[in-house]
Amino acid sequence: MADGLNNITFPGERESAVKTLDAFARYLAIDAQIRQLETSGQHQAAVTLCIGTNPGQSNWAFEEFKKAHLETMEINQKEFKLAIDASVNTLNGFEVKMPVLMGAIALLTLLGLRPRLREYLL
């Protein structure tokens, strides 16, 4: 996640990444509570907190983290698709342009070398 936060590029990405980080911190805090409950002998409370889906419980917190992370990923995926589409548009016609360009280079090379080649004819 640190790499992602160090590579904020697109509009809305920073806010989404911070939201993801906050959700992950909440999840880790709940995980610490679960561990504390378990080490203090409150096994059932630890299990309830661990498998619970209500706000403030572990599975809820993890789902919130996944939603926030997905939002960040969608921003990046949208920008990736836009970049790919722009690249494809840039390459449109390449299969026609390149042979024409290669032919022009070959023709100009031949025209440039003809006077030199004539010097060697006997």
Image: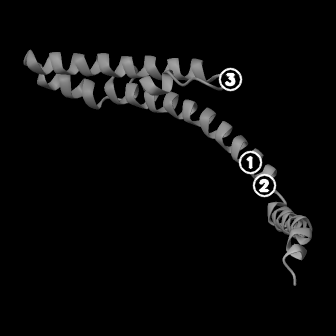
Q: What residue appears at the point 65 percent right and 22 percent down from the top-left corner?
A: 12
Q: Which residue is mark 1?
A: 87
Amino acid on which disc 2 is placed: Leu
What quarter of the picture does the C terminus occupy? bottom right
Asked if the residues shown at circle 2 and circle 1 are in contact, with their CB atoms under 8 angstroms apart, the answer is yes
Distance from the alpha carbon under mark 2 to that under mark 1? 6 Å
Q: Residue at x 20, y 28 (%)?
A: 47
- Tell me if mark 3 has few (under 14), some (14-19) or many (20+) residues whose alpha carbon lies within 10 angstroms of its own: few
Q: What is the residue that sits farthest to the front in this orientation?
A: 122
Q: Position of residue 108 (x, y in %)?
A: 90, 64
Q: Amino acid at mark 3?
A: Pro
Q: Is 90 placed left or right of 31 in the picture?
A: right
- Residue depicted at x 85% and y 62%: 101
Question: Which comes before the other along the chain, label 1 or label 3?
Answer: 3
- The amino acid type of the residue labelled 1 equals Ser
Which numbered tag is attached to residue 91?
Answer: 2
Mark 1 closeness class: few <14, some 14–19, many ≥20 residues within 10 Å: few
* Quadrant location of the N terminus in the rendered image: top left
**Viewer-nearest of labels 2 and 3?**
2
Q: Considering the numbered disc 2 on the image, is that residue within a helix, a strand or a loop?
A: helix
Task: Compare residues 42 and 82 and report the one nearer the observer.
Answer: 82
Figure check: 15 above or below 105: above
Q: Residue at x 85, y 63 (%)?
A: 105
**Nearest to the observer: residue 24 or residue 88:** 88
